[in-house]
Amino acid sequence: MVLYNLLLNRDIVLALMKKLIVVWICLLLVAGGAFAWYATNNSNDKVATKLIEKLSVRDAKVSGIYRKPDCEIPTGYILKNIGNGEFFRVICRVYYIKDSTKRWRDMTCIGNFGLHPMLDHCYQWVPYQDPAFAPFKPH
């Protein structure tokens, strides 16, 4: 009976509809903003990772590369104390064969999402010392 009386009151129905429309618009804006943020960061990660992989292999200065390097995701390693959140530092493990032994070299790559290109080189993080092969698990 109460619902029937509410439906008969046109002003109440219109006010409820307006509130629902406002709620739906807010939800769509929030979802759209989240998607835009994800798409931008995902795109930045893809572009940066592709460049990081290429530069880490080049700057490792080794031959006998036998697989694609493993690299950390740049947006997961933002340098908090520098700039406005555009600087990142990642480690890539470059895999190669020397004297019939599988080896790796860890490379550090520092870049800036605001620059084009985002980075132009990587450098060796820790000199290779142990012939034992340790798997790399990017975070």
Image: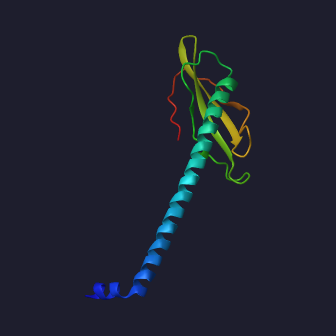
55 sits to left or right of 139:
right
- Residue at left offset 53%, top offset 41%: 139
Residue nearer the viewer, 3 or 53: 3
Residue at 63 percent across and 16 percent down: it is 63
Residue at the far top in the pictured view:
99
Residue 105: x percent and y percent?
Answer: 61, 26
In front: 5, or 83?
5
Hey, which quadrant is residue 94 in on the image? top right
Q: Is residue 124 visible?
A: yes
How many numbered discs sit on the rendered protein? 0
Give the percent coordinates (x, y) of residue 104.
58, 24
Which quadrant of the rendered structure holds the N terminus?
bottom left
Quadrant of residue 70 within the rendered picture: top right
Residue 74, can we see it? no
On screen, residue 138 above or below 130: below
Front-most of 36 and 69? 36
State the colouring used for the structure image.
Answer: rainbow
Residue 22 coordinates in the image, percent (x, y)? 50, 73
Rendered position, 21 above or below 94: below
Residue 106 on image: x %, y %:
62, 30
